[in-house]
Image (spheres, grey):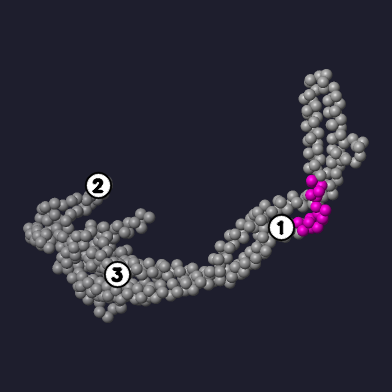
Amino acid sequence: MLNEIGQQLVVVHGQSDQIRLRSAAAQREALDRFAGPGFSAVLAEYQDVFRRWQTAQSELDVLVAERDRREREAEELRNAMDEIEAAAPQRGEDAELADRAERLSNLEDLRLAAVEAQEAISAQLSDDARDATVLVESARRALDRVSGHDAELAPVIESLAAARFALEDSSAKISSYLAALDTDGGRELETIQERRATLAALARRFGPSIDEMIDFYESGSTRLLELDGDSDRIDALRAAVAADFARVDQLAEQLSVRRREAAERLSAAVTRELDALAMPDARLSIEVAPRDLGLTGRDQVAIRLQPHPGAEPRPLSRGASGGELSRVMLAIEVVLAGSDPVPTFVFDEVDAGVGGASAIEVGRRLARLAETAQVIVVTHLAQVAAFATNHLTVVKGSDGTITASSVHRLEGEERAAEMARLLSGLPDSETGLEHARELLGMARAS
């Protein structure tokens, strides 16, 4: 992650192919930023429409691909809902039917038990019947005859009277129960069992319980509306996809036109810089070639270098030597500085193979680049060092045991002496010092 972040913060150009614009994507991004804010606005609109088009197209593809499956699902769901609707189940109906079936299955036992109970309470067969009602009444009368002799019998007599009333009430309820027993219970039981079988079969398929089957029916209506709406949705998506594609195609063409125009401007500007950097015959070209539509348009961008007339333009990393490559990248960075800034640049011997007036131009362009970024340069040319605002020298020393390098900041005459050493090899040479001071004055005036 630090490596990825570092690539956005520090750009190193040296005697190798480790260049900033190493990939086609990076070259396209640099060209897009150079194209300006008008291009960025078109690109932003294009990407919004492109994403919307892709999303709609993906949904359309899924709906079309699964249309047969969804039609089968809709048909199966419709049939299931018709079956459930025909049965019209009610919540809790299964428990109610189970209780009713249990009663009807034991109808004769219930009748015999009720008759026996009623006869035990109040037989009403003859005057001599000794049922519960008669026995309780006999007990009450026996005690009532002697109640005048003992007041404590009064509550007992009242209890017996209440018991008689309770027995008579129970007898009346049993009579009502017997009268209410269906004399045709067998036919009703058959109907109930058929209903239970129908509900159980539906519950096994759509339940497993009746309540869950009803839930399935209720949610199925919403799902069926969704499935039945596929045709309308497909038609709407096809219209949206066609409209968005037309707009995408239109915006992609605008991007291509703007990229080609920016490529011409960038190529011309970098080529002019190369002329001043002792590469008068070199020409930079930017190829904008068509490719399949993507999030950035339909263009593939490639920066190529023609080192001299008659040579075939080649990719940057293979179109120049190490020293030439450094100067090519310096020219590109100077032109891109306003639209594609980077916090820190490091150039390692960008002036290799350059001298004289060309070296001064290299220094001047490094100073221009330093107006918008931090620029660190490793150089052996005084003409380049003269343009620095901070001059460091690296010195290697040894005490006979350990060899170590140190870095020292140069100020005033120290700087002039170091530049004189670079010019003539003699730090104390008056001619060299005079030349160094002249270079420093020229750099300050630039």
Q: Which mark is residue 259?
A: none
Of labels 2 and 1, earlier in sequence is 1
Residue to which mark 1 is pinned: 200
Q: Quadrant of the N terminus?
A: bottom left
Residue interval drawn in magenta: 176-192
Residue at the top extreme, as displayed? 149
Residue at point 74%, 50% (across, down): 99
Residue to which mark 2 is pinned: 400
Residue 91 lies left or right of residue 264; in this view the side is right
Residue 215 lies left or right of residue 435; in this view the side is right
Mark 3–mark 2 contact, CB under 8 Å?
no
Please state which amino acid type lies under the numbered disc 3: Phe
The majority secondary structure of the magenta stretch comes to: helix
Which tag is nearer the camera, tag 1 or tag 3?
Answer: 1
Q: Does residue 170 show up magenta in the picture? A: no
Q: Does residue 191 show up magenta in the picture? A: yes
Please state which amino acid type lies under the numbered disc 2: Gly
- How far apart are the two marked residues, 1 and 3, measured between alpha carbons? 69 Å
- How far apart are the two marked residues, 3 and 2, measured between alpha carbons? 63 Å
Q: Nearer the viewer, residue 216 or 248?
A: 216
Secondary structure of the residue carrying numbered label 2? loop
Secondary structure of the residue carrying numbered label 3? helix
Badge 2 crowding class, 10 Å Cα cut-off, few under 14, some 14 to 19, many 20 or more, is few
Q: Does residue 18 appear in the picture of this structure?
A: yes
Residue at the bottom extreme, as displayed? 310
Residue to which mark 3 is pinned: 39
- How far apart are the two marked residues, 2 and 1, measured between alpha carbons? 102 Å
Q: Nearer the viewer, residue 46 or 320?
A: 46
Please state which amino acid type lies under the numbered disc 1: Ala
Q: Residue 365's spot in the image, x, y percent?
A: 19, 65
